[in-house]
Image (cartoon, helix red, strand yellow):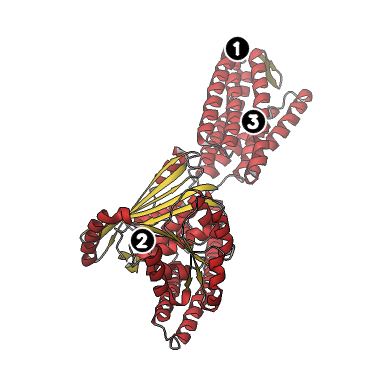
Amino acid sequence: MGTLILPIATQLLAVLLLFIYFSKKRLNTKENKIYSKMLIINFIYALMAIITFLYAKTYGDDFVISIMQKIYMSLMLLLIINILIYNISILNMKDSIRKILNILIRFSSGILIIVVFITPLHVINKGDILDGYGLSYDIVLGATVLYFILIIISIIVIFIKNKSGFTKDIPFICLIVLYIAGLLIRDSYPSIMFENYLFTFMLFIMYFTIENPDLKMVNELLRNKELVEQGMDDKSRFLFETSEEIKTPTKNIIEITKKFDKLDDDVDKKDAVRLISVNANNILFRLNNILDISSMDANKIKIKEDYYNTSIFFNEIKGLTQNAIKDKNIILDFKVSNNVPTSLNGDDVKLKQVLMSVILDCIENTDDGYIRIYIDCIVRYDVARIIINIEDTGIGMSIEKVNDILDDRTELTDSEAKKLDKLDVDLKATIKIIKLLGGSFNIKSEKDKGTTFTIVIDQKCKIEESSKIMKDIEKYSSDVYGRKRVLIVNDSKEELFAISDILGKYNVDINTTMSGKDCIQRINAGEFYNLILIDDELKNNSAFAVLKKLKENKKFKIPVIVMLEKNKEHFKDYYMNDGFNDVVLKNNLNDEIERVISKFL
């Protein structure tokens, strides 16, 4: 009976493991479910070893013993199979592939156990030795070797693909090494029943590697501590960067106000006021971000509604977009319908964040071609329904990805809320912001052909402006085909806004770009304009270099007007000789633009 010492010790350890594990509240994870099954199977496995040995030495019926030994071997196979399933559960792979593998393993193991029971097994029952041989025994031995090979392969894959999960396989490595050692020892000492002890020892080590509730709680606390510290760092960094960014427009306002009293010309004063307005809007945008970042909890994010100028707003969007695409071979087609009121009531900061997030996503996924942005509006009484279509010719998205983005119905999480200090947030967070604004979002996409985003959002407008827009629509329908197209080329946002405001007085279709390269690409792509206004001091290309490239196209006959600073007035004749059709002096934009409009349009 000395042979039973190890099985009895194993049984006591198996009972202890069951008690310790199930006495605590545990997490309902896949790993824990598999581990629970293994503990129960191992308890029965260890108990079966004792019962089989006692029956064999007491009664000695070979047929019954062979059935009991087959049950014993089947339990061992189930333990090994669950080890393989456990490894698959911690592998980084698609759920569909994992399910298929689990089904195949369970199906094959079921067939295997049936085969073990129907094939012959001869009992060896002499003295303290209890063993067997035959086809059933050989099948179990072969299956054990095969499963161990698969376990070793899965351990290698985990090490390569998921090093953080490799520690979870340490018990299995110990089992395989000790199992091989046990087989060698059994050759010399056949009475030793080592198998169930090795599996119980493995489960004992495994207990310290799986996620138990106490360890999970400690890890969560540590992780939360890290997130809090990271959040504080992010806030500090953001506030520092924002304070630096606020300094520039603040200094600009101070400088402009110092010079304001010295300006005699009303036009110069109006330009100065426009520049103050642009810089003040930049400061307001940053201050609104600070208010949001100071409460990084998703539940505390508030919608701040106020009236804003749509002309300035969409010109800022256009300017930011042109800056973002200047290093890419992309043509920007940006149009704002006349139906859009000049003043709307809403959260323009978050609307800007939504639009720029979608636009920057389009730019990131488009290397060449075009990005079309069209803003239309339907006005009813005091409500303006803004319809924004953003289309690109980029890489597109699969239907699965589109569904994944649109099907996320969760609220804005705290981790997403922490990232709302930037213009660029991911599409899932963008949709959630649109919902906070009371809008809707749709995506149409085709792989390798491009994507179209549609944003619909309602905002309030003044009733008197609503009636004015309806009259404008009627007028627009009569003269839309007679409108002239003007392209402004200037890499200064402030000057673009100023020139666009002046041109807004005339019945012209205003188009802008901040890049001479983009101007050339538009003309070469077949876009037509009745007039081009180009600044002399472009950063990347001179006005003359752009004109020279345009005139390489023999069909090019569009009048090109160059805009000069007052101190370059004496160079006017040189510019005219170089091929420009006229010269506009920027110190008197109102009169100068009126002159060229009446002359060329």
How many marks are shown on the rendered structure? 3
Cα separation between marks 2 and 1: 92 Å
Place residue 260 in its image quadrant.
bottom left
- Seen in the image, is 98 located left or right of residue 160? left
Residue 322 percent coordinates (x, y):
50, 59
Camera-near label (3 vs 1) is 1
Q: Position of residue 369 (x, y in %)?
A: 51, 47
Residue 11 visible within the image: yes
Numbered disc 3: secondary structure: helix
Residue kind at label 3, given as amino acid type: Asn
Q: Which mark is residue 289?
A: none
- The kind of residue tagged 1 is Thr
Task: Identify which amino acid the numbered label 2 is placed on.
Answer: Val
Q: Quadrant of the N terminus?
A: top right
Q: Are marks 3 and 2 in contact (CB under 8 Å)?
A: no
* Quarter assignment of residue 12: top right
Residue bearing mark 2: 508
Q: Is residue 391 left or right of residue 51?
A: left
- Among numbered discs 3 and 1, the one appearing first in the sequence: 1
For disc 3, the neighbor class at 10 Å (few under 14, some 14 to 19, many from 20) is many
Q: State the residue in front, 438 or 206.
A: 438
Q: Residues within 10 Å of mark 1 (few under 14, many from 20)?
A: few
Mark sitting earlier along the chain (3/2): 3
Q: Which residue is mark 1?
A: 119
Q: Is residue 538 above or below residue 566?
A: above
Residue sitting at x 57%, y 63%: 544
Tag 3 residue: 196
Nearest to the observer: residue 92 or residue 136? 92
Q: Earlier in the sequence, mark 2 or mark 1?
A: 1
In screen coordinates, is 154 left or right of 533? Answer: right
